Image: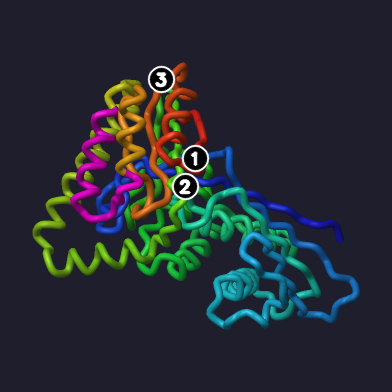
């Protein structure tokens, strides 16, 4: 049986992170320049049921059952088998790799899950639908993030811009005019689960204040959606800056993120903000296409360990 491979892109949240966990809208888009890959190969010499996981990026090279019982890879295999009503597996090897930086707000965990689910279900002869892949990837996101909104697995599964409200049907985000974003990576690893948990504790102790902050973030997301649908992309800049201010007040920015936001604006970006869970990871800057390289260089000079220029359309 030939090897079966599947891919999944990274993602950025344009507006609405953290508030989306509390029912406010968020806007997210795929980032096709980075991706996760899963390949499933038959092991003709292995005994039935033997599953080997090879994931050098995270130093895993072992049998599936050598991993903790609650490890997400164990969960993924179990969920795919349950969805397909498969009682036992043939001997196989699952190889995982990714160019998406981990713990940086680009959806690395969700992308690995989506690629893993697609490759394994296709190898077993029953490729799961996007809806099924999305549902299973969300369950795995709960391991990574505790109480995720579901936006990461959604935008990555469908590989399209989305307008997302937790618990509501997925809406494709209509972008009337393409625009350019520079992504700057602080190089600081920051697991989303920690930031999400801290924000929840703050929300529990200062509910009224944080509900007000989430309302303001939600209003910005709504305004950004209308702006994108009208093709008025330049108006996104001030919305990004205001969203960043609110995320600072929510408590999820960091000096390195603030420095990159300031450097981007000083280099001519129309707006900038942190992206994802915060406390580290990535930020994004809205730029004119002809100014993208200049802003990317300014971010590197301000401490970014890598930059990505992407067109959103």
Residue 308 vertical position relative to residue 83 in the rendered view, above or below: above
- The quarter in which the N terminus is drawn is bottom right
N-term mark: 1 or 3: 1
For the residues marked 1 and 3, what is the alpha-carbon distance in whole angstroms?
Answer: 22 Å
The quadrant holding residue 95 is bottom right
Q: Position of residue 109 (x, y in %)?
A: 52, 59
Foreground mark, 1 or 3, reads 3
Numbered circle sitting on residue 252:
none
Per the model, the C-alpha gap separating discs 1 and 2 is 6 Å
Q: Nearer the viewer, residue 250 or 78?
A: 250
> Which segment did they paint magenta?
236-257
Quarter of the figure with residue 208: bottom left
Residue 24 place in picture, x, y as percent: 25, 50
Label whose residue precedes the other's in the sequence (2 or 3): 2
Pointer 3 residue: 288
Residue 302 relative to residue 234: left or right: right
Q: Residue at x 72, y 77 (%)?
A: 63
- Residue 155 is tagged as 2
Q: Please say whether residue 266 is one of the residues in the magenta stretch.
A: no
The quarter holding residue 21 reads bottom left
Residue at disc 3, secondary structure = loop
Other residues around mark 1 within 10 Å, as few (<14) / some (14–19) / many (≥20) = many
How many residues crowd around disc 2 within 10 Å: few (fewer than 14), some, or many (20 or more)?
Answer: many
Horizontal arrangement in the rendering, residue 304 relative to residue 257 (left or right):
right
Q: Are marks 1 and 3 in contact (CB under 8 Å)?
A: no
Q: Residue at x 77, y 79 (%)?
A: 50
**Residue visible at 57% across and 60% down in the picture:** 113
Percent across and percent down for residue 78 are 61, 75
Residue at the outermost left position: 208
The figure's colour scheme reads rainbow
| Residue that numbered label 1 is attached to | 160
Residue found farthest to the top = 290
């Amino acid at each position: 049986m030939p090897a079966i491979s599947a891919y999944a892109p990274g993602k950025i949240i344009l507006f609405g992170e953290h508030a989306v966990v509390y029912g406010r809208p968020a806007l997210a888009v795929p980032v096709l320049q980075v991706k996760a890959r899963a390949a499933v190969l038959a092991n003709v010499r292995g005994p039935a049921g033997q599953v080997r996981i090879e994931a050098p990026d995270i130093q895993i090279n072992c049998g599936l059952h050598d991993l903790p019982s609650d490890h997400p890879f164990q969960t993924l295999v179990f969920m795919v088998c349950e969805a397909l009503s498969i009682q036992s597996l043939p001997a196989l090897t699952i190889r995982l790799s990714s160019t998406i930086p981990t713990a940086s707000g680009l959806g690395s965990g969700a992308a690995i899950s989506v690629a893993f689910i697609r490759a394994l279900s296709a190898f077993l002869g029953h490729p799961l639908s996007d809806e099924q892949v999305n549902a299973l990837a969300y369950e795995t996101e709960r391991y990574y993030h505790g109480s995720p909104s579901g936006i990461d697995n959604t935008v990555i599964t469908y590989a399209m811009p989305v307008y997302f409200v937790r618990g509501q049907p997925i809406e494709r985000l209509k972008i009337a005019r393409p625009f350019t974003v520079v992504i700057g990576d602080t190089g600081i690893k920051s697991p989303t689960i920690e930031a999400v948990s801290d924000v929840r504790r703050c929300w529990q102790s200062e509910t009224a204040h944080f509900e007000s902050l989430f309302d303001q973030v939600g209003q910005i997301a709504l305004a950004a959606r209308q702006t994108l649908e009208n093709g008025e992309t330049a108006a996104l800049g001030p919305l990004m800056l205001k969203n960043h201010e609110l995320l600072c007040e929510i408590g999820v920015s960091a000096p390195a993120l603030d420095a990159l936001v300031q450097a981007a604006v000083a280099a001519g970006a129309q707006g900038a903000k942190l992206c994802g869970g915060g406390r580290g990871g990535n930020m994004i800057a809205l730029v004119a296409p002809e100014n993208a390289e200049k802003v990317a260089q300014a971010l590197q000079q301000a401490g970014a360990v890598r930059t990505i220029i992407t067109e959103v359309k």
